[in-house]
Image (tube, helix red, strand yellow):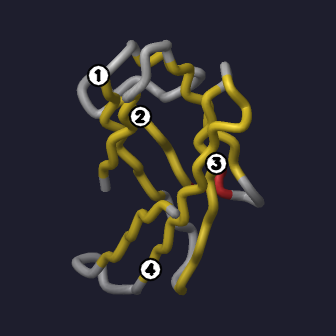
Amino acid sequence: KNFTVRNISEVPLVLSLRFRKHARHFLEFTEYESGLPVTDHPISVYSHLCIHVTYKPIQVGEFEYEVDIENSLTESNIETLCIRAIVTEELHEEGLEVSCG
């Protein structure tokens, strides 16, 4: 799945991801265009960054993870992503939902 972070302010934004629980072990966040990992990524004024989420499950079941997306320059500027995954034994079936708010 993909989502976009938009900087709609007149100051740069430095994107930082904070993982809750064990989300870091199962989720990978990369820049959609380059495939590079997202780590303290600057986003220019009135610009955006498209992020690709890859989920690497190790067992069957339903899972929920939370990841905080924070502007490192303004720590009060934070959003929490809720990521829900359904893993089945069937390789052709998959479900991943990313929501904010």
Q: Earlier in the sequence, mark 3 or mark 2?
A: 2
- Residue 6 in the image: x percent, y percent? 36, 34
Q: Local crowd at mark 2 within 10 Å, few (<14), some, or many (≥20)?
A: some
Residue 57 appears left or right of 43: right
Name the foreground residue: 78 vs 68.
78
Q: Which residue is denoted by mark 1 in the rendering?
A: 34
Q: Which mark is residue 30?
A: 2
Please report contact status of discs 3 and 4: CB closer than 8 Å, yes or no: no
- Residue 31 in the image: x percent, y percent? 36, 30
Query: Quick one: which residue is furthest to the front in this view?
Result: 10
Q: Residue at x 40, y 85 (%)?
A: 88
Is the residue 53 above or below the residue 77 in the image? below
Q: Earlier in the sequence, mark 4 or mark 2?
A: 2
Q: Which residue is denoted by mark 4 in the rendering?
A: 87
Query: Quick one: which residue is furthest to the right in this view?
Result: 21
- Residue 72 in the image: x percent, y percent? 67, 24
Q: Earlier in the sequence, mark 3 or mark 1?
A: 1
Is the residue 32 above or below the residue 9 in the image? below
Please report contact status of discs 2 and 1: CB closer than 8 Å, yes or no: yes
Q: Which tag is nearer the camera, tag 1 or tag 4?
A: 1
Give the amino acid at mark 1.
Answer: Ser
Q: Earlier in the sequence, mark 3 or mark 4?
A: 3
Q: How many marks?
A: 4
Q: Which mark is residue 23?
A: none
* Circle 1 SS class: loop
Q: Which tag is nearer the camera, tag 3 or tag 2?
A: 3
Residue 13 appears left or right of 97: right
Is the residue 85 above or below the residue 100 in the image? below
Q: Which residue is denoted by mark 3 in the rendering?
A: 68
Give the amino acid at mark 2.
Answer: Thr
